[in-house]
Image (cartoon, coloured by chain):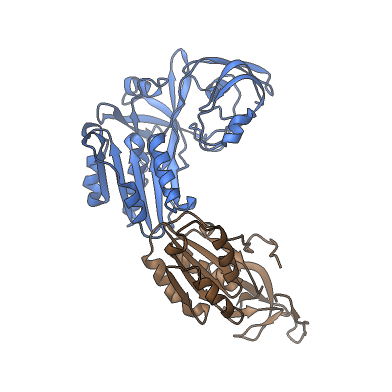
């Protein structure tokens, strides 16, 4: 399902394509692997010899690990979760040089959190290649308690931290790598709002 | 009146010959007090008024410290084959003279999100970096400047910068065969470095081209291309909106000729980069001499637009939407 632009802060994504660079860091989760495999079809000779792939298979991606390894990247890492991969990413960025190009593919949660680590290292967000693949699940910050709920697929959603019923907005924060969730029944907390699966 | 063209009345406080080609001018506000704040990389447009000829307006980078707005200083390289603006500055401007300069405009500003600033200068392209290094040094900013020049005697402010910033300044003398090892420099910079280039067009093209090839995103590469308008053959133009026909002299820019006819198009840089004075061409019979860095190559070929601050025309007729 394509992601439509709505309000200005709502990120939109492109299609990964090989960029000129001295090193390439490709980060993906789940179905994002397919975006890397598609990029490989147009990658110039020697691209993956200067590349590192960081892959988080999650529930659906184990089958892609072999295909990604077959691209023969200089380094391959597969990890159990985005959270587990982030310290490693920050370390990579801290010692990297200009000429490193960054490619992010998969869920919005992965793209957003990896992009945050990249921008904190001084990479302009507009110079990062992104491609959305797979689940539309969102990372949501409760604007009331500031807690972040991962992999939100419903509208509204119950905050995993404070229990408020949150309306998930398209309003996105690059600084937090999260969409904003606002209490949907603040006037009358007893009001029950039907819950729908809208971010499958 | 267009944005950025607000004028400042200044008095020449000092004129300092720096070397055979470069002279520095210090401007203080005629009414006293402080001049408007600016940031490193900003320029002002200096109005040169000489009896018996239309005024010339040339852009010059401010090179004084942005932390001190008691005066603005510019350094002018004498251009013996130009249209006379720099010669006028060198020969006619004396301490005590009153002049008019524009408010500062910055089209070459530092990106203060950078983890490091890598600056590359050629010749008189050093001037914006004199202001930028002063600004960064005061903030504890991380910068490194590589500066190439033909000979030691023309190394404008090379000594001064080395004295101020020591090992952060690297000088390259062309006549000693010293070359900037550009690829090594560009591939050894920490992530988050921003690159700034100011100098002759071939140098800018070389640096920007290598940076792109070596994977520097365009967001991290900044360059200042503008130069004063060049002279050329005289030509006529018709201003369709205001119903005037103008003559553009050999030493005059098309923009100056339009202004001399009492028409006031917007402008900021007068150097072909900011895009403010972009003008539609209604019809023409002849050849455009595009000297700007604003319009795309396609727009240059189309014959539909011209940047009158730096570009010229040769031919039978030119009708502009002004």
Query: Residue A128, percent across and down?
Result: 52, 60
Q: Is residue A82 above or below residue B200?
A: below
Q: Which residue lies furthest to the top in this view?
A: B52
Quadrant location of the C terminus of chain B? top right
Q: In which quarter of the image is residue B301?
A: top right
Which residue is rendered at x = 68% and y = 71% of the image? A169
Query: Residue A106, percent across and down?
Result: 59, 70
Which residue is rendered at x = 49% and y = 19% of the image? B252
Q: Quadrant of residue B37?
A: top left
Q: In which quarter of the image is residue A42?
A: bottom right
Horizontal placement of A173 versus B15: left or right? right
Instruction: Kindly tell me whether residue B63 is visible in this rendering.
Output: no
Q: Give the number of callouts.
A: 0
Query: Residue B273, percent across and down?
Result: 51, 36
Observer-nearest of B35 and B276: B276
Quadrant location of the N terminus of chain B? top right
Letter of the chain in brown? A
Q: In this view, does A184 lie above or below B230?
A: below
Letter of the chain in blue? B
Observer-nearest of B55 and A112: A112
Q: In this view, does A67 lie above or below B135?
A: below
Which residue is rendered at x = 44% and y = 14% of the image? B51
Instruction: Kindly tell me whether residue B239 is visible in this rendering.
Output: yes
């Amino acid at each position: 399902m394509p992601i439509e632009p709505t309000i200005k802060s709502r990120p939109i994504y492109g299609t990964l394509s090989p960029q000129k660079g001295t090193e390439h860091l490709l980060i993906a989760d789940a179905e994002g692997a397919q975006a890397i495999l598609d990029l490989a079809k147009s990658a110039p000779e020697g691209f993956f010899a200067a590349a590192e792939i960081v892959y988080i298979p999650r529930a659906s991606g184990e089958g892609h690990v072999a295909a990604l390894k077959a691209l023969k990247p200089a380094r391959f890492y597969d990890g159990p979760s985005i959270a587990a991969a982030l310290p490693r990413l920050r370390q990579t960025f801290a010692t990297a040089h200009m000429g490193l190009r960054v490619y992010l593919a998969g869920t919005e949660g992965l793209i957003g959190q990896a992009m945050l680590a990249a921008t904190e290292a001084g990479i302009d967000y507009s110079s990062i290649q992104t491609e959305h693949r797979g689940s539309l699940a969102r990372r949501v910050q409760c604007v009331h308690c500031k807690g972040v709920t991962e992999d939100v697929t419903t509208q509204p959603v119950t905050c995993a931290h404070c229990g408020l019923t949150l309306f998930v907005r398209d309003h996105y924060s690059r600084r937090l790598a999260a969409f904003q969730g606002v209490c949907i029944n603040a006037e009358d907390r007893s009001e029950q709002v039907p819950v729908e699966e809208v971010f499958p | 009146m267009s944005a950025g063209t607000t004028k400042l009345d200044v008095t020449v406080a000092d004129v300092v010959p720096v070397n055979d080609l470069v002279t520095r001018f210090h401007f203080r506000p005629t009414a006293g007090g402080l001049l408007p704040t600016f940031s490193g990389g900003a320029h002002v447009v200096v109005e040169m008024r000489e009896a018996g000829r239309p005024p010339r307006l040339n852009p010059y980078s401010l090179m004084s410290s942005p932390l001190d707005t008691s005066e603005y200083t510019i350094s002018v390289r004498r251009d013996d084959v130009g249209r006379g603006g720099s010669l006028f500055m060198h020969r006619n401007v004396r301490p005590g003279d009153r002049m008019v300069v524009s408010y500062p405009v910055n089209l070459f500003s530092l990106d203060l999100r950078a983890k490091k600033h890598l600056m590359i200068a050629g010749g008189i392209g050093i001037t914006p970096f004199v202001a930028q290094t002063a600004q960064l040094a005061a903030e504890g900013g991380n910068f490194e400047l590589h500066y190439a020049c033909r000979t030691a005697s023309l190394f404008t402010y090379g000594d001064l910068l080395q004295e101020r910033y020591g090992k952060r300044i690297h000088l390259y003398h062309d006549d000693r065969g010293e070359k900037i090892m550009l690829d090594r420099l560009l591939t050894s910079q920490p992530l988050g470095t921003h690159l700034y280039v100011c100098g002759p067009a071939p140098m800018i093209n070389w640096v920007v081209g290598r940076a792109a090839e070596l994977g520097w995103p365009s967001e991290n590469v900044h360059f200042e291309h503008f130069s004063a308008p060049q002279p050329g053959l005289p030509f006529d133009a018709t201003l369709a909106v205001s119903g005037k026909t103008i003559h553009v002299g050999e030493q005059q820019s098309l923009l100056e000729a339009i202004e001399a006819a009492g028409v006031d198009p917007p402008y900021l840089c007068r150097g072909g980069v900011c895009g403010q004075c972009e003008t539609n061409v209604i019809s023409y019979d002849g050849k455009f001499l595009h000297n700007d860095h604003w319009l795309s190559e396609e727009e240059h070929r189309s014959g539909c637009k011209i940047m009158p601050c730096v570009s010229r025309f040769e031919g039978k007729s030119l009708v502009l939407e002004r």
